[in-house]
Amino acid sequence: MATVTLKNVPEELVRMLKGEAKQNRRSLNQEALARLESSLGAPRRSGGETVKALRRLHKRLAGLPEMTDAFLNRAKNEGRS
């Protein structure tokens, strides 16, 4: 993969990108790449690549609690009392 260096990036733009990265739980680099791919219409994955990516995601999420109504209601109400 190539490395790209950006120069003279306005501080406000960096601040906004960092905020978006934090909100999306990405690194600054990951957020910038996601934004570039989105704006440039990156090539779509094949069906097989999509299945592989979904299987990787499924493995990553395997240890998380199940999203039941009870779990979601408890999470919503935790900070309200």
Image: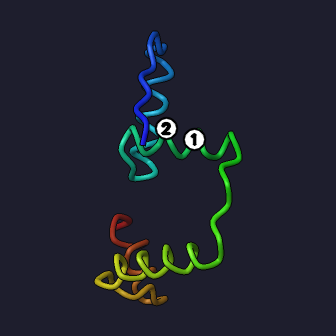
Looking at the rendering, which quadrant does residue 21 occupy? top left
Q: Do the CB atoms of the residues marked 2 and 1 lie less than 8 Å apart?
A: yes
Q: Which of the image's four quarters has the C terminus?
A: bottom left
Residue denoted by label 2 = 32
> In the rendered image, which quarter contains the N terminus?
top left
Residue annotated with mark 1:
35
Q: Amino acid at mark 2?
A: Ala
Question: Residue 57 placed where, x, y %?
Answer: 43, 75
Tell me which corner region of the image, top left, top right, bottom left or bottom right, holds residue 58: bottom left
Q: Position of residue 46 (x, y in %)?
A: 65, 71
Residue 22 lies, in percent from the top left, at 39, 45
- Asked if 63 appears above or below 23 in the picture, the reply is below
Q: Is residue 61 above or below residue 41?
A: below
For the image, the number of numbered tags is 2
Residue 18 at what x, y percent from top left? Answer: 41, 34
Q: Quadrant of residue 80?
A: bottom left
Residue type at mark 1?
A: Arg
In three-dimensional space, the C-alpha distance between marks 2 and 1, rounded to whole angstroms, equals 5 Å
Q: What is the secondary structure assignment of the residue under circle 2? A: helix
Q: Nearer the viewer, residue 52 or 77?
A: 52
Task: Please report the residue visible at 39 percent of the width from the left and 53 percent of the height from the top.
Answer: 25
